[in-house]
Amino acid sequence: MKRIYDTIIQIVEKYYPVFFVLLMTLIVFLSFYRLDAAYVNSWDEARHGVNAYEMMQNHNYIVNTYGYEKDYWNYKPPFSFYGVMLGYRLFGYTVFGMRFYSALCYCILSLVVGLFVKRYGKLDSLFVLAFLAANFRCFEYHMIRSGDADSMYVMFFTLAMLAMFLIPKKKWMLYGCGFFFACAFLTKSWHAMMIVAIGGLYLLISGEIKKLSVKQWIMFLISFLLPLGIWAGTRMSQDGITFLQGMLEYDLLKRTGETLENHDYPWNYYFEFIFCDNKIYLPALIICLAGALYFQRIYRKENKGEIAGYLLWILVPFTAFSIASTKLNWYVYPVMIPLFICAAVFIARICKEEQIKLGVRITVLTLTLLALFFGIKDGYTCIRDLNGDEFQSFLMESVDRDSQFAGCKAYIELNVPEYPTYWTQCNHLLGELEGDYRCVNGGTDGFVKEKERAVLYVSREIYVQQTLLEDHAVLYENDQWLLLGN
């Protein structure tokens, strides 16, 4: 049995490039498969989509707008908007185009992490890719397959952390860490300060802070202050300090000190979210704890700085966001990357540790592979079963950008209890992408009074009741909704 087991491990390591490509292919598949199938979510996907679309239409790549008015609700710097724009350029004004960059960023992250972990061993590298493929939560909602800022942010966060680990051997990586921090800030604002906290503590604990010269400190400051300063100065030239002040007062102080938008949860919310309701994260944590206990003597002596780095990478964001008043699931997504790296390293060590009984090694490996299988299966099943929204489908089918009514004002009145005459963010986005509409609130009353060319999306129940709509042309319809033109 031992001979067979050792042969399997040797084959996997011998054909490492083949297995690496296969696992990366799986991650690419899970990232892009049916990427446009799910309904567009108003928070925060549609807002980013509208901001990016209108910036392109305005030919203003600094100021984000919503409804062609300056957007002082979304206080995020523009890097994620640029990612959405890239997708629009490559694939047109489509839902796939909006989400493309998020999936791409996760694939880049996985590739870089897989290659980085190879420094510990080939088996370690393959295991971390398997964990990243089983990262069900991030495939499920608000990151990899969503047109919001999180996938790009986690990518830059991870790149900053990996650069940090390389500082002891390559001092110029300090500048890379600073640059990627700036990129993370320009993607998701104050969330990136977690990088500063982790990096500062790492330099102190590892003793690297004493080895840096004045010149290196100056270059480090330039590496992040220059890109941040260029953006801040350009933004201030457009609307003074209004946007930057809003970033500070709302996006930082209020989100940390107050509960916003009803996102009030107990301090242990993130622990339950990650470890108590999924098949892959708890096994990863158990592997980390078991591996750390078994190998603690070796790693304590030889890798003190790296141990501190990984612990900080996990604990600082997890603790900080648990203390913060406003809690959202995706705030702790960066924590999952070091968790998977550590789990991959320890499971590889356990599989190859001769002093551990063969039966124990086989059992641990089998249970780990089962957990990975079910994590990947859950992710695939979730993606396979994605459904769109019926009205969103109707809206997308009802108009194209070559229509005679494309570019006109658009009103809406639906038979829904909340916001019947109000364009929700998701519908607003699709109205702009599909018909280049100027979405206007006001419903039927606004539509019938409109002097300019306009359309109205109306539910059939309301259409039947409104005699004022009888003389308007029906441009498109099904059994639930109609599109009318004046």
Image: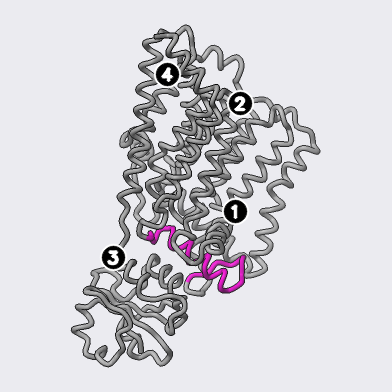
Identify the residue shown where x is 68% and y is 31%. Answer: 167
User: What's the magenta bit mostly, secondary-structure-wise?
Assistant: helix
**Disc number at residue 119?**
2
Question: Quarter holding the N terminus?
Answer: top left
Instruction: Using the image, determine if residue 10 lies above or below residue 92.
Output: above
Residue wearing tag 1: 186
Question: Which marked residue is nearer to the observer: mark 3 or mark 4?
Answer: 3
Crowding at dot 1, Cα within 10 Å, few <14 / some 14-19 / many 20+, comes out as many
User: Does the magenta-highlighted stretch encompass residue 44?
Assistant: yes
Could you tell me the amino acid type at mark 1?
Leu
Identify the residue shown where x is 71% and y is 41%. Answer: 175
What is the CA distance from the residue labelled 2 to the residue labelled 1?
30 Å
Residue wearing tag 4: 290
Question: Which marked residue is nearer to the observer: mark 4 or mark 2?
Answer: 2
First along the sequence among labels 3 and 4: 4
Question: Quarter holding the C terminus?
Answer: bottom left
Range of residues picked out in magenta: 40-66
Q: Mark 4–mark 2 contact, CB under 8 Å?
A: no
Could you tell me the amino acid type at mark 2?
Arg
Residue 260, x across and y down, in percent: 40, 55
First along the sequence among labels 4 and 2: 2
**Disc number at residue 390?**
3
Instruction: Using the image, determine if residue 187 lies above or below residue 136.
Output: below
Judge by depth and name the residue closer to the eye, 305 or 10: 10
First along the sequence among labels 1 and 4: 1
Could you tell me the amino acid type at mark 4?
Ala
User: Seen in the image, is 64 located left or right of residue 365?
Assistant: right
